[in-house]
Image (cartoon, grey):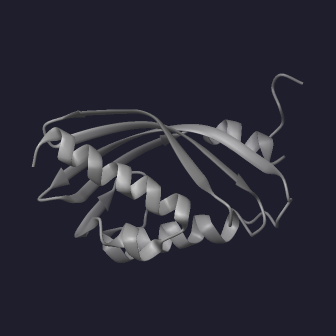
């Protein structure tokens, strides 16, 4: 597939996330999907990860800010927003809104996402949730 076709697959991933369409997201990953940033692996692991995020942030949405592709790799820089309305990392719902940046590198084969390396702004997210002290305060 071309780099542009690979970008379309990744774009579809984020569109499905923002619609909370777990089935559509699962259809975009390979059975042996490898998430280098999680213990959840394979298509079933991807579904579990997505469902976890949606349960913790039921209004989660992602907005792509940059999408760069070369060969079988696509790099996405995006903003994620959501409201903490479910358990997250052992923290009960706070009702707080979060907004954080993330950069992910996707590897694709035959129109499916086979691997991902995610680099979210975890510190920023956890600070907004009150799980870490705000260094600027």
The quadrant of the rendering that contains the C terminus is top right
Residue 107, above or below 113: above
Q: Is residue 109 visible?
A: yes
Residue 110, above or below 63: below
x%, y% of residue 123? 67, 37
Residue 24, above or below 101: below
x%, y% of residue 46? 40, 68
> Which residue lies at the image location 69% right of the left edge and 36% below the top edge?
124
Q: Nearer the viewer, residue 61 or 37?
A: 61
> Which residue lies at the image location 13% right of the left edge and 37% below the top edge?
71
Q: Is residue 25 left or right of residue 134?
A: left
Q: Nearer the viewer, residue 64 or 73?
A: 64
Mark count: 0
Q: Is residue 123 left or right of residue 107?
A: right
User: Which residue is the extreme one toward the top?
Assistant: 136
x%, y% of residue 127? 77, 40
x%, y% of residue 69? 24, 34
> Which residue lies at the image location 49% right of the left edge and 67% below the top edge?
49
User: Where, by quadrant of the figure, is residue 57 drawn?
Assistant: bottom right
> Which residue lies at the image location 48% right of the left edge and 71% below the top edge?
21
């Amino acid at each position: 597939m071309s780099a542009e076709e690979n970008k379309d697959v990744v774009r579809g991933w984020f569109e499905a996330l923002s619609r909370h369409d777990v089935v559509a997201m699962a259809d975009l990953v390979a059975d042996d999907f490898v998430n280098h940033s999680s213990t959840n692996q394979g298509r079933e692991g991807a579904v579990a990860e997505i469902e976890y995020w949606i349960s913790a942030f039921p209004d989660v949405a992602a907005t792509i800010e940059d999408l760069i592709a070369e060969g079988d790799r696509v790099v996405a820089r995006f903003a994620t927003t959501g409201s903490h309305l479910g358990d997250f990392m052992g923290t009960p719902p706070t009702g707080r809104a979060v907004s954080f940046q993330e950069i992910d590198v996707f590897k694709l084969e035959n129109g499916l996402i086979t691997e991902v390396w995610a680099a979210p702004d975890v510190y920023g997210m956890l600070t907004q949730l009150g799980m870490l002290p705000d260094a600027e305060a």
